[in-house]
Amino acid sequence: MEDVTSVDFSSRPFKVNVGDKVYEAKSVIVAAGASPRLLGVPAEKKLTGKGVSYCATCDAAFFRDRRVVVVGGGDTALDEALALASYASEVTVIHRRDQLRACPLLQERALASKKIKFILNSVVEDILGESRVEGVKLKNVATGETSTLLVDGVFVAIGYTPNTGVFKGQIQLDDFGYVVVHNETKTSVDGVFAAGDDQDFRYKQAITAAGSGAKAALDVAKYLQDNPL
């Protein structure tokens, strides 16, 4: 239960460094996951799991007939808002710019929903509540005016960051840091495979990550049969 500090995939056996320990392997599965980007406001971490969430698919049902906000203006944010609209009594999308960045179809669907409202040119300065979310403090970036919005939940949808920093320069990553794979799980280095959210920028679900982990394990078994040395 430790963090990998560096790797060397230049030759077999591959080397995985954990502090001052070095582990050698004939094959490696990279399954580092991805972390949601945080708002960075004071009460965010304290109230995570107590009204602050990063996944509407996971938690929307807990907010039936409650008021929630979604922070963000891209495809993910409107997907979250639409999912929440099936349960919540009111969904307010808060976006720092004067226009949404989501694709036109998602914008059209969200704007057509009677449950979804929008507050643009605004950011969340803090999340209110001691033991659970009770509201958010907002700031209008154009006027500087602050206000309070009473809500029961805050869904942060401003993107994810793959946890792949230690693999930079060792395997191919895309412009956003996700592992580039081909044939399902194979990376740019023969014998190194990837599974889960560090190579999946779309689904980000435990079940899809587990499925790709099973694929990677089967691919490793086949690779080791074909490359025993």
Image: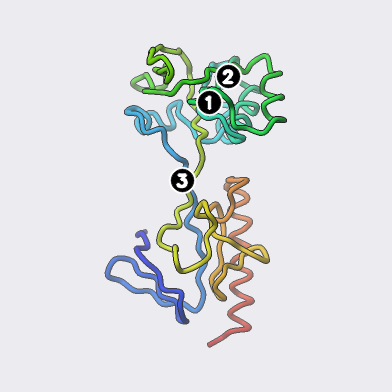
- Secondary structure of the residue carrying tag 3 is strand
Q: Please report the residue visible at 37 percent of the width from the left and 66 percent of the height from the top.
A: 6
Amino acid found under the numbered disc labelled 1: Val
Of residue 157 and residue 103, the one placed in the foreground of this image is 103
Label 2 crowd (10 A; few <14 / some 14-19 / many >=20): many
Of residue 229 and residue 141, the one placed in the foreground of this image is 141
Q: Please report the residue visible at 42 percent of the width from the left and 36 percent of the height from the top.
A: 38
Label number found at residue 91: 2
Amino acid found under the numbered disc labelled 3: Ser
From the top left corner, tell me how far across and down residue 21 is, in percent.
30, 71
Above or below residue 155? Residue 23 is below
Q: Choose the circle earlier in sequence order: 2 or 1.
A: 1
Contact between marks 2 and 1 (CB within 8 A): the answer is yes
* Furthest residue in direction front, as rendered: 142
- Secondary structure of the residue carrying tag 2 is strand
Label 3 crowd (10 A; few <14 / some 14-19 / many >=20): some
Residue designated by label 1: 70
Amino acid found under the numbered disc labelled 2: Val
Residue designated by label 3: 35
Q: Choose the circle earlier in sequence order: 2 or 3.
A: 3
